[in-house]
């Protein structure tokens, strides 16, 4: 399976240019920039109102303040008074809410006011600040917006410097492999192929120029929608300042009001879109490897899963399935009859996912190259020569995905593979990565949807536009079936087209911890459908690390084991029977939780709720909680804290407000406290919130394997009123867009010796089972009588003492006494 040569080539790519390690440039305040005079806005001389736009001027420069919604205000700077084209790959068309806004003027300031936010512009020095309607300032300029002429291309470097409050902490920023709180750090956004990246290494694969600040318990967000190389300094250089700047483009940012972090995240999603609803199989367990080939190996791995009864929904084919790494072809020596193989796998419950890279081999006899070449679809340099570089296929050219025609064409190329039965696509190397030189040279020209620009402008959105082309093409090819895509590079808004993974991590305990940080950060940065290479991509985990990582994997929105070719085997049984048994138990847990997980994906898709929720997001009013990094909620009902050290026998876990049931024993803990939990190898700190109604599937080997006779609902007793939400539909079609789905809302109330469950259902989908088996967990009284919609139902007991009742799935009211 191993192929060491590839790894050597890969290592060569980590050039000094792409690897900046932990350099913090503490002694170099103008990080990477030449010393040039900065120009600042002067005093405001007047403004013009145009609908919800207010354009202020200092006589020459202009600043536009646009009321986007009651909670979102956009600010743009035009140093010479001319704004750039108003075009964004990140921001989607905003629904036209009727919101009210007005402007007031006093001696010193202008105030643009919405129902929830006041944006103040100081006349004297043009400082812009934002406060809530009670006048509490959350975000304010430290210096007027400024810029400097960029000698490289005649545009501007643009700067915004905000105040950083003493207690302020900072979240977001995408895939940065750093502590959750970014205070004291500088980050740089320039999508980079960062094989075996290190803690604090920056930049990485993705650009999410969005952060959340929390001060005095209140949160706001800033989305700096600029695709050039961008930088953020979170009170690193000066403790009282937070800056962001860019090597080109417009100073344009959105202020997103809170005051809850959750509000900010949801509003950021409203701006940039939510994740598509994945097919249900995409949230099962996936097995990947660089690479499974030939066909016999793929079949062996698949049948091994079934033989050992370890659930698995998808198997991946990395680059070696292609003919000489030519995209959209098969290596017929390794895979003589791909259709047959894929359909056999499919009959056995496996979906096949394959990789597609952007580099197209320069080869006159290769149809993809010929079509791209004849239509001038490949990127060209400033002097009009084609951009060429070496990647896996050798000499390559690269489609310009920022051209809409190229995207359409690219989307059609998948037809053959789709006809062969491939169910999902994996877009890699789209930072874009080029051997030796790292990426494209700056002078490469891009169409940029008609707003032409060089690679300086298009670099950070190249991968996003590639996976967009993939996704949009698949939408047409699969018709009413949902596509599944995964990408390595991303820009804000990529969630509309793809899931993401964190790239080439390492099989170390440190990297398991980094993964816990990265996935939480991605989740509050709009990329909830994310995962790490479970077990680590490079290096060799032992059974314990692999197993602990698998446990974290159950609570990773995307759950996939993947590894580089020269490392030891990584199937769940590769580490011996003891570890296999634990991994099997946890993969089964993922499958039990599927109806819950699917519901939280729906909540992401429909309402923009993040899937992983750091404790900071749950209880931001307690400063100490803003610094907690290891415990997080998975949806709104499950709290976990993965074990991150070898030999660890117990772990101290903070539990937020409420009561929490330790999942493996149903022992109850009170929240707002730290508790110490034993961590035997076959358990991990995992808690269900008291009052929850948690749906559970029977263990299946893959999604849809069995007809579900009755859905299990676990009711976790807790006094008071509690709401739980469920979602179900076909699992893989778009009928949900026509309301063919079922949203369920359960209200559980308990007081003294009485409890009650109400159910409300909305939508047109009919479930395939008629009954719920409702398990009563942690009830403090002897249950004597259960009445469902007026009819007494018997209370049944399992051998182990568990009590349950069987009721119609469309019950409206159950009383328990
Ligand atoms: O140059 O396709 O991050 O997941 O296995 C390496 C081979 C290219 C990098 C990806 C990794 C994948 C590998 N790829």
Image (cartoon, rainbow, N blue to C red):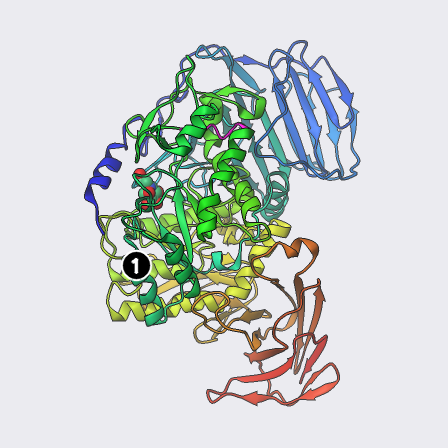
Picture coordinates of residue 786, whole percent (x, y): 67, 85
Q: Report the span colored magenta.
A: 398-403
Q: Residue at x 31, y 66 (%)?
A: 304
Q: Is residue 267 left or right of residue 660?
A: right
Residue 204 quadrant: top left
Work out whether residue 88 or residue 28 is closer to the camera in this orientation and state it: 88
Could you say which quadrant of the image residue 781 lies in?
bottom right
Quadrant location of ligand 1?
A: top left
The one of 636 and 615 positioned closer to us in this rendering = 636
Q: Nearer the viewer, residue 271 or 413?
A: 413
Q: Quadrant of residue 783?
A: bottom right
| Coordinates of residue 427 in the picture (x, y in percent) | 42, 41
Q: Position of residue 715 (x, y in %)?
A: 58, 75
701 shown above or below 534: below
Residue 537 appears in the picture as rendered: yes
Horizontally, residue 296 falls left or right of residue 782, namely left
Going 38% across and 70% down the picture, which residue do you hit? 585
Q: Residues within 10 Å of mark 1 (few under 14, many from 20)?
A: many
**Quarter of the figure that contains the C terminus:** bottom right
Question: Compared with residue 345, is residue 379 higher up or lower down, i.e. above or below?
Answer: above
446 on left or right of 217: left
Label 1 element class = helix
What secondary structure prevails in the magenta region?
Answer: loop
Task: Tell me, yes or no, if residue 209 can be seen here.
Answer: no
- Residue, disc 1: 546
Decide whether residue 577 is among the magenta residues.
Answer: no
Image position, residue 52 (x, y; %): 75, 28
Horizontal side of 199 relative to 267 (left or right) equals left
């Amino acid at each position: 399976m191993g192929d060491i040569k590839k790894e050597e080539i890969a290592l060569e790519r980590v050039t000094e240019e792409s690897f900046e390690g932990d350099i913090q440039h503490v002694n170099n305040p103008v990080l990477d920039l030449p010393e040039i005079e900065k120009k600042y806005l002067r005093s405001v001389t007047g403004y013009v109102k145009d609908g919800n736009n207010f354009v202020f001027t200092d006589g020459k420069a202009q600043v536009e303040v646009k009321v986007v919604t009651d909670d979102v205000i956009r600010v743009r700077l035009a140093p010479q008074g001319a704004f750039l084209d108003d075009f964004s790959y990140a921001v989607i068309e905003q629904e036209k809410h009727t919101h009210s806004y007005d402007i007031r003027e006093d001696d010193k300031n202008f105030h643009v006011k919405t129902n929830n936010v006041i944006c103040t512009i100081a006349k004297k020095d043009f400082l812009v600040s934002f406060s809530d309607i009670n006048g509490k300032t959350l975000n304010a300029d430290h210096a007027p917006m400024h810029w400097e002429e960029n000698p490289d291309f005649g545009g501007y470097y643009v700067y915004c410097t905000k105040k950083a409050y003493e207690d302020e902490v900072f979240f977001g920023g995408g895939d940065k492999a750093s502590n959750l709180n970014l205070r004291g750090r500088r980050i740089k956004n320039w999508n980079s192929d960062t094989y075996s990246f290190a803690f604090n290494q920056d930049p990485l694969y993705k650009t999410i120029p969005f952060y959340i600040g929390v001060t005095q318990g209140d949160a706001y967000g800033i989305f700096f929608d600029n695709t050039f190389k961008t930088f953020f300094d979170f009170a690193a250089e000066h403790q009282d300042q937070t800056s962001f700047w860019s090597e080109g483009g417009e100073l344009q940012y959105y202020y997103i009001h809170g005051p809850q972090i959750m509000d900010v995240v949801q509003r950021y999603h409203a701006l940039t879109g939510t994740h598509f609803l994945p097919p249900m199989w995409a949230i099962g367990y996936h097995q990947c490897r660089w690479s499974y080939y030939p066909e016999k190996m793929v079949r062996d791995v698949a049948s091994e899963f079934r033989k050992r009864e370890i659930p698995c929904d998808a198997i991946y084919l990395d680059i070696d399935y292609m003919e000489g790494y030519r995209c959209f072809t098969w290596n017929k020596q390794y895979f003589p009859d791909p259709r047959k193989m894929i359909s056999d796998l499919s009959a056995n419950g496996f979906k096949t996912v394959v990789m597609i890279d952007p580099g197209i081999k320069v080869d006159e006899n290769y149809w993809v190259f010929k079509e791209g070449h004849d239509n001038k679809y490949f990127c060209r340099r400033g002097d009009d020569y084609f951009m060429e570089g070496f990647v896996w296929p050798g000499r390559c050219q690269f489609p310009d995905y920022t051209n809409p025609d190229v995207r359409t064409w690219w989307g059609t190329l998948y037809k053959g593979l789709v006809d062969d039965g491939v169910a999902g696509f994996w877009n890699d190397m789209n930072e874009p990565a080029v051997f030796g030189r790292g990426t494209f040279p700056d002078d490469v020209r891009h169409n940029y949807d008609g707003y032409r620009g060089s690679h300086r402008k298009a670099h950070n959105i190249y991968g996003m536009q590639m996976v967009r082309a993939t996704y949009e093409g698949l939408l047409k090819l699969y018709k009413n079936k949902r596509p599944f895509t995964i990408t390595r590079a991303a820009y804000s808004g990529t969630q509309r087209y793809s899931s993401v993974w964190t790239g080439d991590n390492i099989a170390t305990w440190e990297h398991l911890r980094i993964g816990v940080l990265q996935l939480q950060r991605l989740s509050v940065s709009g990329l909830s459908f994310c995962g790490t290479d479970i077990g680590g991509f490079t290096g060799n985990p032992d059974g314990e690390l692999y197993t602990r990582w698998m446990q974290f994997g159950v609570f990773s929105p995307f759950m996939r084991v993947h590894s580089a070719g020269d490392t030891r085997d990584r199937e769940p049984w590769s580490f011996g029977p003891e570890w296999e048994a634990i991994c099997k138990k946890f993969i089964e847990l993922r499958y039990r939780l599927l109806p819950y997980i699917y519901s939280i994906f729906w909540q992401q898709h429909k309402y923009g709720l993040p899937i992983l929720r750091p404790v900071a997001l749950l209880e931001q009013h307690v400063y100490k909680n803003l610094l907690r990094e290891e415990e997080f909620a998975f949806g709104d009902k499950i709290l976990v804290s993965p074990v991150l050290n070898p030999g660890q026998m117990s772990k101290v876990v903070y539990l937020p407000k409420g009561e929490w049931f330790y999942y493996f024993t149903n022992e109850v803990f009170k929240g707002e406290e730290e508790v110490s939990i034993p961590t035997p190898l076959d358990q991990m700190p995992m808690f269900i919130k008291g009052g929850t109604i948690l749906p559970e599937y029977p263990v299946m080997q893959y999604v849809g394997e069995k007809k579900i006779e009755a859905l299990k609902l676990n009711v976790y007793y807790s006094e008071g009123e509690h709401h739980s939400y469920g979602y179900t539909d076909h699992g893989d079609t778009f009928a949900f867009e026509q309301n063919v789905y079922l949203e369920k809302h359960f209200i559980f109330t308990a007081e003294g010796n009485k409890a009650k469950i109400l159910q409300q259902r909305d939508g047109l989908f009919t479930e395939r089972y008629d009954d719920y088996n409702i398990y009563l967990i942690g009830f403090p009284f002897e249950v004597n009588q259960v009445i469902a919609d007026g009819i007494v139902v018997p209370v049944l007991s399992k051998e182990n003492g568990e009590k349950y009742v069987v009721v119609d799935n469309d019950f409206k009211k159950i009383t328990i006494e």
